[in-house]
Structures are given as C-alpha cells and as structure tokens.
Amino acid sequence: MIQPFDFYNPTHIVFGPERLNELDSLIPQEARVLILFGGESARRFGTIDKVREGLGKRTVLEFAGVEANPTYETLMKAVAVVKDEKIDFLLAVGGGSVIDGTKFVAAAAEFDGDPIDMFGGGIGKQLPIHSALPFGSVLTLPATASEMNAGSVITFVEKGAKLGFGSAHTFPKFSFLDPTLTYTLPKRQLANGIVDAFVHIFEQYMTYDAGALVTDRFSEGLLQTLIEIGPRVVNDSEPDYNDRANFMWAATNALNGVLRPGVPQDWATHMIGHEITNLFHIDHARTLAAILPAMLTVRKTQKQSKLLQYGERVWGITTGTDDERITAAIDKTAAFLESLEVPTSLSAYDLTAKDVDALVANLIAHDQVKLSEHGDLTPEISREILLASL
Amino acid sequence: MIQPFDFYNPTHIVFGPERLNELDSLIPQEARVLILFGGESARRFGTIDKVREGLGKRTVLEFAGVEANPTYETLMKAVAVVKDEKIDFLLAVGGGSVIDGTKFVAAAAEFDGDPIDMFGGGIGKQLPIHSALPFGSVLTLPATASEMNAGSVITFVEKGAKLGFGSAHTFPKFSFLDPTLTYTLPKRQLANGIVDAFVHIFEQYMTYDAGALVTDRFSEGLLQTLIEIGPRVVNDSEPDYNDRANFMWAATNALNGVLRPGVPQDWATHMIGHEITNLFHIDHARTLAAILPAMLTVRKTQKQSKLLQYGERVWGITTGTDDERITAAIDKTAAFLESLEVPTSLSAYDLTAKDVDALVANLIAHDQVKLSEHGDLTPEISREILLASL
C-alpha cells in the first residue's frame, strides 16, 4: 500500500545563467552576511565577486576552507565567527559539502547546548533543533541536492564518524542554480555528481513495490535523464548548456523530496559508503558506485519486483527469465557507471578482505546494523556485499 | 534552450487517511477560523465534523455555499464575514472551487482597495497583491491542484467573465490529502477530475521541444499514471486505495509547479474552455475534453515534435509517417477521454456554429486574442478549433 507521507519543501529555486544580481531582493537589506565556501576556485572563477556584487552594500564577511566531507572541527570555527561578528544570514557558495556545512553552522549558531548533541550515532544525544539562522546557497557542483533539502552530513575527524542531521529549519531560503557555473568543473567532479544523484534515486526507488505510481515514474524519468546525458556531460569537449541544465535539475530533484511520497527508502549503500570514505578517504560518490552493483546482486530477492520494473522501464529489458532480466539490469547499471569512468568495485582502490573487517567493525560501532528498507541488512550481509565488491 | 525559471512551493502536504487530528499542530492555537465549503456533502459525509474536532477549542465559524466556478458575488459575502468576525485563518474544505474561492477571500480581505482590481481581463486594474490571510485546505475532490498552488479562477456573474489571479501570498499553508475522502464522489466528478488533471499536464507539456528532459519525463510519467488508473477509478464498483491515492497525487503534481521548469506553456484550451463554461454552464473539465482533440489537430504543425514524443513515450507509437503517428496519438488521447465517459466534441452538448460566434466574441471581449505558447493563436484560429470540435 502507498504509505502516508508529508511533503514540504519551501526552498525558492532561482535557475538560469547570470542571475546573481537577484540576491539583492532575497536577503534583508540590513543583513550581516557570512559567505562560506571551500577552496579558491569559487574566487578564481569570479563567483565570489559576483555574489559580493549582488549583495550590494550589506556587511559581508567570508569563511573559506570548508572541506569536501566538511568537518565539525572546521565548522565550529565558522560558528565562532557568526557569534563574534553578529552574523544573521549565511550564504553557501559551493557544492554539497559547503551547503551541508552551512546548514550545520546555521543550526549550531542557534542551538541551545553543545552542537554535538544535534547528532546521534553514539557521539551525541540527538536533541531536537528548534531554530536556525536563515541561509541561501549558490550551487557550483550539482550532486547532493543539499541546495533543496534540509539534510546535512558532517565528518567528525577525532571520532572517525560521518553523521547526518536534518530539521524543518535547515532548508535553504533560496538556491541559485546556474548551469554555466559547472563549465569549469573537472571531469572527475562531474562524474562524481552524476553518480551521487543516480544513487540518491536508487536509494528511494530500488526497494519493494509500494504501488506509488507517480513516485516510481518520477524516479524512472530522472534515471533515464542521467543515463541519457551522463556520458555526454563527462566526455564532451565543449559544455552544452542544456546537458548541464538537465544534469543540475536532475541532481536537485534526486533528493529534494519528490521521490519520497508513498515509498520506502533504503540508504544502505550510503551508510556503507560513508564508512569507506571515513577509513580510506575515497570520494563519496565513488564509494557508492563501488558497492552498488554488489548491493543489487546480494539483495536481488528483496528487490526483485523493482529490479524487474527498472530493467523494463529504464533499460527496455523485456525478455529472459526474471533472473536473467535482473542480471541484465544490474550489468547495464554497472556499465553506465563505468561509462562515466567511475569504477564499480573496491578492488579498483586496492582494498582487500582485511579492509572489509575494519569497515564492518565501524558499521557496528556507528550502530549501522539494521539497514535497508526492511531493516534486515545486518553487518554480516554488509560484509557479504563488501566482499562481493572487491 | 531550456528557459530560466523560478520554482517555489511552500505548501505542506499531509497525505494519508484519517490525519485531520494533525490540524491542531498546523494552525495557531488562538486563531479565529472560518471554514469555507460548498454544498452539504462535506457535512453529510462527516468531514466538517472531523475538521471541527481537529480544530479543538479554537473559535470556528462556517461559510457554506461556495459554488462550483465560485463567484465574486458569493465570495465577497465571505470577505464581509472575515472582516466582521475578525477571522485570521481560513480553512477550505472541498475541491478546486472552494480552494480557489478561499484564496480570493484570503487576498481580498487584506487587499488595499477594491478587490476587483486584483484582476485584469478588462474588469479591474490588476494591481499587485501584497499580503493575504493564512489558509489551509482539506481536499475532497482531486482535479485542479489548487491545494498546492497559488492560483485561483473566479467567475464574475454580472460581467459574464471567468478570470484568474495568483500571488506568492496565496499558497495554502498546508493541504490535507486523504484518498478515502474521494470514495463518496460520484462517477461524473471523478471523471472530471481525471480530465482536468490530464489537460493541466497537456497545457504545460504539449508545446514545443525546449530540451527540458526532467520536466518532460515528469509530465509523461503523470500522463502514464492517469491513463493507467483513470478508467479503473471511474468504473470500479469498489474504490481501490492505491488507485485513489495515485489519482490524488497525480492531480496535485499536474499543477503544483513541477511540470513548469524550463518549458513554455500553452493554456489555450483552458482559455477557450472558460468561455464555454461561462456561456453554456458546461463543467470545466468537460469543456477541456470537448476541444482538446480538435486543438491538437489544428495545432499539429506547431506541436509536431512534442506530439511525436508523446505518441512514442506515452502510447508506444513508433511506426508510420510523422503525420500518421500524430493522428494515432490524438486518436489515443480522444479514446482515453471517452473511456472516462467524457465526450470529446461540443456537439455532445448540442452546440452549433452560431454558438461558436458567441464564444469567439467573448474571447475577444476578454482579451484572449494571442493565445498558446507562441502567442499566435488568434480568435480566427480559436474559431477553427471550436468549429472542428462540433
């Protein structure tokens, strides 16, 4: 049966080239703004300048150095700046890491108590978040959809953990999506973004059949879009505006809530992937691609009806036994990921069975022991998936 | 090229059976609430009672009698009640007419000047709307998506006009979507709702190819959903929860903004349909079905690429000349509408060529002279479409 659901997403999307002058109408005139960004590329390619121009005469400070897989340790320094400088509006300029980090800063700045207690996972008390500073984003790297959702994943260096939080208060007020800002991205980041979006769709779609026809069709449409444009985006010598725009909008929709109504969710690939990034510092998206085919193969009984539906609707696989069709669908999926020059095994990163032991130990330490849509994916099954990914 | 766009939709959807007790957490405790509804069915089937129970001890007044095609004349009486009784929250219980009417009341109650100036179309000055009372909805009839958008269409009896307005302030704060509330709907209203949603998708999808892959896939997915469930919803002797839930969610998505990003829009079928309803009091949805096949046939050159795409992706039409494939797609569309027992010609309502003259005269009087995605649909082409619909 279609599950009851709530849908709520108040983020205002401003999509199209060269619209940063509209920042002026979206932020209070008297705001004291902190711009958060990562490395120097945002400055080098002129985005920070355009943002500052759009902000006009407001008081504007900058906080550079938010890492990929943003850390609690770094972000607490931004929280201190916010408090010291009486900042009342945050503006993230970057990809999912910068926006996730900005969400943390927005909530931590107003959190009553130690911000570590915004998290669970054995490191904090996971207390409710009652407010957050308002913030917006200027997206430079399509991938995570953080620009249009309320979730955030933060890395705790000292504790060796990667944990998430979310709240109705941590939606961006607005996000600027300018496809031309992707023109300067290296191929590896483009590929990672496509894989990240692709697996976000899978986590919400590839479960069991709940009869939610609209949500299934939306998921399939986004998968078809990424399959159509992905190889072109990664391999074209000249960027194509429509391809980049379709990539950007598909990645946002992959995790802005439109794929959730009425369906169960999985997220086991992400939970296992987080541990791989933690221990071996492999790019988030690459950890997902490395285990997805093995995940689908090990879990093909639980996911049978959706694997068959996916094969038929997305890849046009209509002949053969059920098992043959499922194998063909998984093979097509792996081939698509490989076409983006992203490996679909952990052996590509020289991991071995011994590393699998360490990963499984961390899953247990972080309480990731009942994963997947049925809550039946135990550490032993995680081990089986990881071994099959080697 | 994919067009620049803004996406903003802050309505909170509460979807599932028997959730009206959650009203309590969504409306301020001290609110003075006016419930607006249509006929007595909302009371007879117990919905008003459940709503009042959900509202607890708040002060609650009722305004019954909002018509299908809600009128300015009736709604101004509700505006008077709001002012006299110091109402500060409105709650629509009904379908698109009640929700559209409630949007008008919400905006008119706070409008600085004569509310007729919220409209253009030759009857008002179309001044901007700067605020509106907060309001929510309890949807009883899926069709218009008014429960999750900011638009409203109002009928002016004295002036013989049907005109729309919208504003960022007239989104419902929340809407309750309970598929079981559709179980008591008569077959005719179910069929009308499916047709209304179907044509909403067409108005946004069936234009020219803008390269917006995500939006196209979403539109096609919704069309496929309505085609799959439509005949079952209309003809089943026992209502099926999933069918009703899919119908309800498809109708909401048909006009909540997710089909707009990057694409042009048509709306000519609606503009002509409004005049038919005005003059001949034919149900809104039925006017759309009566002219849609003729519209597609007369405009098949302008819409060629999308008609071919629609035929292939939605109906699986892949053989024949372009013209044969387009004709087949239009025939399939008409057959689908007829399968809902909704006529696809105006002669079913005994209209004649003389009536077409009156309709064209009204289109001109209401300034509907440059319709469709190219603005090239003149009154003469409207006449051609109407004559072909006879």
Image (cartoon, coloured by chain):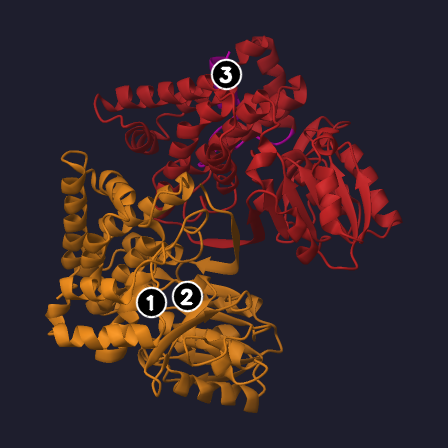
Chain colours: A orange, B red
Counting other residues with Cα less than 10 Å from the Cα at mark 1, is it few (<14), some (14-19), or many (20 or more)? many
Magenta-colored segment: predominant secondary structure: loop
Counting other residues with Cα less than 10 Å from the Cα at mark 2, is it few (<14), some (14-19), or many (20 or more)? many
Name the kind of residue labelled 2 in the image: Ser
Q: CA distance from mark 2 to mark 3?
A: 45 Å
Q: Residue at x 69, y 39 (%)?
A: B93
The chain holding disc 1 is A
Q: CA distance from mark 2 to mark 1?
A: 26 Å
- Per the image, the residue denoted by label 2 is A146
Q: Are marks 1 and 3 on the same chain?
A: no
Name the kind of residue labelled 1 in the image: Val
The mark closer to the camera, 1 or 3, is 1
Q: Position of residue B44 (x, y in %)?
A: 73, 30
| Left or right placement of residue B384 versus residue A223 in this view | right
| Left or right placement of residue B78 versus residue A52 in this view | right
Q: Residue at x 21, y 23 (%)?
A: B319
Q: Quadrant of residue B164?
A: top right
Q: CA distance from mark 1 to mark 3?
A: 53 Å
- Per the image, the residue denoted by label 1 is A369
Name the kind of residue labelled 3 in the image: Glu
Q: Residue at x 74, y 33 (%)?
A: B43
- Magenta part of the protein: which range? B366-390
**Residue B216 seen anywhere in this rendered image of the structure:** yes
| Left or right placement of residue A304 versus residue A21 in this view | left
The chain holding disc 3 is B
- Per the image, the residue denoted by label 3 is B341
